[in-house]
Amino acid sequence: MPDISEHLRRSNTVIAVVGATDTPWKYGGKIYCDLKAKGFQVRAVNPNRDSVDGDPTYPDLAAVPDEIDIVDLVVPAEIGEQIVADAAELGLTHIWFQPGAESLEVIEQAEAAGLDVIRHQCIMVRAGRVG
């Protein structure tokens, strides 16, 4: 199974951005558009939006029609708890907590579920350094 860094070297990597938004000053919008501009296959997950940057959104991870390589959380930790549970149930393996999206409880939950966890790092920065 490839690690997260390996996925960031591939243009066909599918990244589900949970909390993606069209609100330009919010990180959910900045991260979504940045990863899309870098050539990643991004999928917007947000039950409160119909589209993000002209792309369809999905209400949850289960609704994403593609195989997800990385789940990137840009939501409060309280919401992240359900996302982590969903990711584990779906057999997803890589979860990325954007700064501010993590709590000790949700990190422990993800690790206990056997998920590969990245935290304290921004995916936009990390994706820009790889390759």
Image (spheres, rainbow, N blue to C red):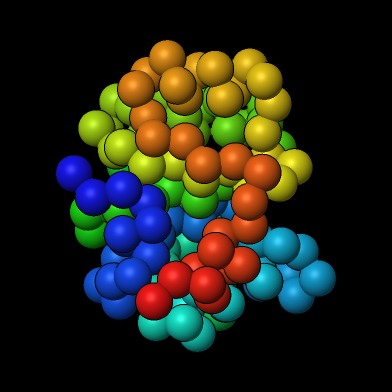
The answer to which image quadrant residue 8 occupies is: bottom left
Position in image of residue 51 (x %, y %): 52, 70
Left/right of residue 24 with respect to residue 129 in the rendered view: right
Check the image and name the residue furthest to the left: 1
Q: Position of residue 83 (x, y in %)?
A: 48, 33
Q: Nearer the viewer, residue 30 or 6?
A: 6
Give whichever of 54, 121 is nearer the camera.
Answer: 121
What residue is at 32 percent from the left and 60 percent from the top? 7
* Above or below, 33 relative to 117: below
Residue 21 in the image: state x and y as whole percent. Answer: 64, 64
Q: Position of residue 27 (x, y in %)?
A: 71, 62
Is residue 112 among what the camera can see?
Answer: yes
Which quadrant is the C terminus positioned in?
bottom left
- Above or below residue 41? Residue 39 is below
Which residue, as the protein is rendered here, is positioned at the far right?
25
Measuring 23% from the left and 50% from the top, which residue is drawn there? 2
Q: Is residue 82 left or right of residue 89?
A: right
Q: Residue at x 23, y 58 (%)?
A: 66
Q: Is residue 130 above or below residue 98?
A: below
